[in-house]
Image (spheres, helix red, strand yellow):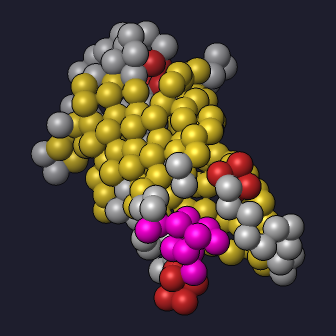
Amino acid sequence: MAAGAAALSLMAGGAVVAQSAFTKVPAEVQSGTYALDASHGKITYYIDHLGFSTYVGQFTEVEAQLVLNPANSTLTASIPLAHASKDSEGLNRHLQTADFFDTANHPVATFRSTRIVVDKDDANEADVYGELTLRGVTKEVVMEVEFNQAGSMRGKYVAGFDGEAKIKRSDFGITYGLPALGDEVKLRIEGEFVKQ
C-alpha cells in the first residue's frame, strides 16, 4: 500500500546536511515534511491469473506524507481504490464490488509506518514496517525501500524512493477466486516526494 519511504540514514539518526546538488547519500537529505508528487508516485501490483499469466494493475492518485526527522521519521499514505485497472473497465467495475475491494464501504486503503530499520550494510536501503488497512482490516506490512536520490529540481527540493512489498489478499478478506486466482500480491512502489 503503498505505496514511498524515508531518507534512510536520517531515520537512523544520521546528521542532516542541506545540499543544493543531487545527492545519493541519505545523511545529506534535508529533514522536514514532504508530500508525494502524485504525477510521479504510484503503486503497481502483480497477481497470478489462473496460472496462465501475471496480471499487472496500478493504483494512481495516491496521497502520501513523509516526515524526515533524525529522531523519528514517518510515512502515511492514502490509496484510492476506485481505479485499480486502467486497461479494462469491466474488470475495474468488478474490483469495486464486494468480491474484491468493496469500495462502496471502503473506498480508500491507508498505510501508516510504525518503525523503520535501516540496513546495517547499506544505508540506502531500509525495511519500513507499517499498518495497511484494506476493506476495514488492518495488518502489518513490511516494505523494502531503496533511496534513489534527492536534490533541487525546478525550484523544489525532491527526494525519490522505490519500494517493494508482498501481501496476501485473503488476510484482508478478499477471497474471490481462490485458489485459482493468486493469493499473494506483489507491490512495487515508486515515489518522488516534494519538500513542503
- Measured from the top left, where is residue 149 in percent x and y? 40, 39
Q: Magenta span: helix, strand or loop, mainly?
A: loop
Q: Is residue 1 above or below residue 66?
A: below
Q: Is residue 127 visible?
A: yes
Q: Is residue 103 magenta?
A: yes
Where residue 53 sits: x, y (%)? 78, 78
Residue at image location 51% in from the left, 25% down from the top: 114
Whether 169 is among the magenta residues is no
Side (left or right) of 83 relative to 100 = left
Q: Would residue 25 be seen by someone viewing this image from the given angle?
A: no
Q: Is residue 143 above or below residue 118?
A: below
Asked whether, in this view, residue 20 is left or right of residue 110, the answer is left
| Residue at 38 percent of width and 10 percent of height | 71
Q: Position of residue 15 (x, y in %)?
A: 36, 10
Nearer to me, 6 or 177:
177
- In the rendered view, tell whether residue 143 sits above or below residue 96: above
Asked which quadrant contains residue 156, the reply is: top left
Magenta stretch bounds? 94-104
The residue lying at 39 percent from left, 49 percent from top is 78
